[in-house]
Amino acid sequence: MVIDDSRAMRLILTRIATQLGFTVVEAGNGREALDKLAEMSEVPQLALVDWNMPEMNGLEFVTAVRAEARYKPMTLMMVTTESEQSQIVRALAAGAHEYVIKPFTPDAIVEKLALLGLVPNGAAA
Amino acid sequence: MIEYPSPTADDLLVIAEQVWTSYLDPEGVNPLIQMPPGETPKEVSAAVSVTGAWRGHVVISFSAAASRHAAAGLLGIGYDDVSTADITDAVGELVNIIGGNVKSLLPEPSALSLPHVQTGGSGHWPNVKEVCSLFGLWHNEPLTVSVLEGTSSAAEAGGVGA
């Protein structure tokens, strides 16, 4: 799942994830993502989550997801411009597994996903 | 207490080059070229506000053609296929990324607003002073990245002007 209010950024992340073999569902903010999750029969393996979004931001989304036992298998990776140490700590404390700061290269995303065991080491996007 | 030197044009260039390398010019074919200070283009502007320990705005101003190139590059579509909505989305995301990285150079804690994009005229930012600006040429079209610090109360300088 790719959650970002920018269509351009969703496209970039979707392209990377698709090339890694993921089937992607997109959402424009946390609220829309939660609505789409509620309709899914299978919990996504991974969500790439922006922080600053209208309606429901990424931190609120992560907190909401972590409050639902059904979504426990989902790996949450923040992909955001928020780079203050305190923000990173907040996101990880709320339940995000990894944190990527924009701008990123495809290799940076692959590297983090490999660390999480979601793609093989050396996978190419 | 942590000292935060003010961001400089060189800082903006480093950030912009990272953005260009990541999204707009990964092959290094059309890099952003730094130019001497000149006139700020007025056709399209995108801004984010920073509030908290530091108050102000990060603004990118584009010529119409530069904004169209940015949308084409970020969305991976042809220059002639770019719509106004594409431009708004793309330049909004660019200022979000550049603004977020500028914020990392500023006193903490602070918060970044959602981007505000204006086409057909430059934005108006009252009660600010320019901290630094980067003048650039991309695809032979001008663009400017500016950091503007609020000079008055939070209520007056906290929002993005239109």
Image (cartoon, rainbow, N blue to C red):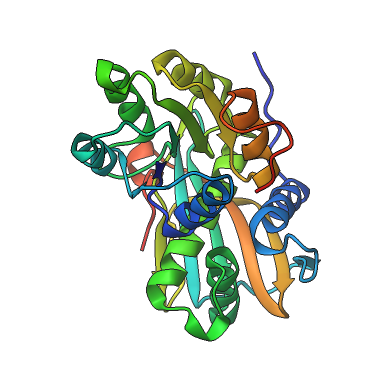
The picture quadrant where one finds residue A40 is top left
Residue B54 image offset from top left, x and y in percent: 51, 34
Residue A93 image offset from top left, x and y in percent: 44, 13
Asked if residue B119 lies left or right of residue A40, the reply is right
Residue B136 image offset from top left, x and y in percent: 72, 67
Residue A79 image offset from top left, x and y in percent: 51, 37
Residue, x 52% and y 66% (percent of image)? B75
Labels in figure, total: 0
Residue, x 39% and y 17% (percent of image)? A94
* Rendered position, A107 above or below B34: above
* Rendered position, B81 above or below A120: below
Residue, x 39% and y 25% (percent of image)? A74
* Rendered position, A90 above or below A36: above
Asked if residue B28 lies left or right of residue B98, the reply is right
Q: Could you say which is closer to the camera, residue A44 or residue B79?
A: A44
Instruction: Residue lying at the far bottom in this picture: please name it.
Output: B80
Residue A99 in sight from this viewpoint: yes
The picture quadrant where one finds residue B51 is top left
* Rendered position, A117 above or below A8: above
Q: Quadrant of the N terminus of chain A?
A: top left
Q: Could you say which is closer to the camera, residue B5 or residue B127?
A: B5
Q: Could you say which is closer to the camera, residue A50 or residue B8?
A: A50
The picture quadrant where one finds residue B139 is bottom right
Residue, x 48% and y 78% (percent of image)? B82
Asked if residue A68 lies left or right of residue B106, the reply is left
Q: Could you say which is closer to the camera, residue A81 or residue A93?
A: A93
Residue A105 in sight from this viewpoint: no
